[in-house]
Image (spheres, coloured by chain):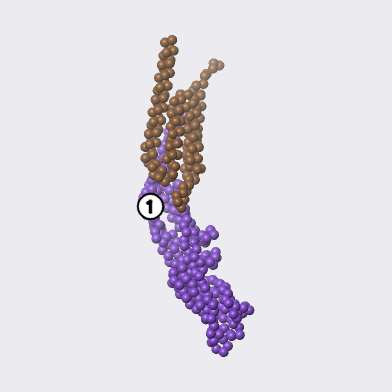
Chain colours: A purple, B brown
Amino acid sequence: MNIPIRMIGLATTFVWIFLVVFLVSAVYSVRDSQFDLGKPQVSVTMENKLLVSLPINIVNNGYYDIGAFNLTTEILDADGFMIRRDSTFLRIISRGGKVTALHDVTLNFDDLLDSSEDYLFNDTDLTVAAFAGMRIAEFIPVQVSTNFSLPWGGPLYNFTLGEPERAGFNLTHFRVTVPMSFENHAFFDVIGNIQVQMYSSSDLLVGDNRTSIEAPQHSMYNGRVEFHVPITELTSRGRFNVYFQTSFFECGPLVIHYG
Amino acid sequence: MADGKNDFKISFRKITLKALKATIKAVLFHGLYLVLWMFLVPISGIVPGFQQAVETFVMIMTILIFLGELTSGTIFQHFFNAAKVLFTICYLFFSLEGGILGISYQNVNLVVDLRLFLAIVVLLSLVEFAKSILQAINYLSEKAEYLPI
């Protein structure tokens, strides 16, 4: 019985040594590897979606392959609801290899506006949750997670329609002018149309016009919209229904009362 | 009288040799730990409390090795060997938090999944535990008194 017992002892000793050496060398492998995130590049896709590309550079100087590298980012609104989730997966990073990949985050305004239209008119902070996972030596799963806030600037910040002013146009109609202003706090230019419908106090559509807008990022827009309103239908109180149509988003009606 | 004195001398020499052997084994084990620690230094930089956990483990293991060697040739040696294995399983299980090790630094959370590693270690320790039991059975069978039929 002594020989089998000794053989068991010998075998377990070898496995112990192998395990310790493997664990230590795996830790050294991680220490010798480099994980870098480059500067994000912002562009616009063919479908008019915002595309943020984050370059990932991985240099595996370790003793083992790195398997199942996965980078996931989630964009959450102020209430913690997920707006967008994107993932990048690299099956294997070979020992001594260097990999460069792009992690693309596509931001569709429809997704954002589904959450709240306040994103057009107010500045807020979005939360970005990032998770990076991999299998060290294709054996030990590791996950790193972090979150940070992403300042969001409203493209139609402080959108206001001023008090309408009237002037005679002809015997039957007034020319009504409404000043319009907003600040583009977004990191993209706002180019498109604004359609304004004017309703009298009796809920009658008395004027409808559209104007084109062009507001570069971080700039103030001042403009006006004009209507030709029948004299008999103009009331001192009423409301405007405003519709926005730009390359990035479409929304409306935004109801603004006057008078 | 002379026989009694000789018996005492022999017993004393035996115990002294055992104590010496146990001390040498414990010192060698501790020396091995010190050598290995040089390679484990990078981990202690990443995992807070790692050094303290390893030191506690090594200290208790050194004591168990010393006691196991001191009681060699008795059934207690096998008890201490079994205790050593069970201690290894329990200590690794609790210190590795069941295999999911989480570390937080500022806004970054690191989670290392060592469940597979822990499973291998537990299996290996169980094999060693079985070995200790077999050794104890072997010891008892060798010491068994044969009665005339």
Location of residue A204 (image quadrant)? bottom right
Which residue is at the front of the view, A224 or A72?
A: A224
Q: Secondary structure at mark 1?
A: strand
- The residue beneath circle 1 is A34
Which residue is at the front of the view, A221 or B89?
A: A221
Rendered residue at 44%/12% (across/down): B4
Which residue in the rendered view is the most extreme toward the top? Answer: B1
Q: Amino acid at mark 1?
A: Gln
**Residue A92: x %, y % from top left:** 42, 53
Rendered residue at 52%/61% (across/down): A77
Residue A38, placed above or below residue B111: below
**Residue B149: x %, y % from top left:** 55, 16
Q: Can residue A179 be seen in the rendering of this structure?
A: yes
Which residue is at the front of the view, B50 or A33?
A: B50
Which residue in the rendered view is the most extreme toward the bottom? Answer: A171
Residue A240, placed above or below residue B105: below
Quarter of the image for the C terminus of chain A: give it: bottom right
Q: Residues within 10 Å of mark 1 (few under 14, many from 20)?
A: some
Location of residue A258 (image quadrant)? bottom right
**Residue B76: x %, y % from top left:** 49, 26
Rendered residue at 46%/61% (across/down): A150
**Residue A200: x %, y % from top left:** 60, 79
Q: Can residue A205 be seen in the rendering of this structure?
A: no
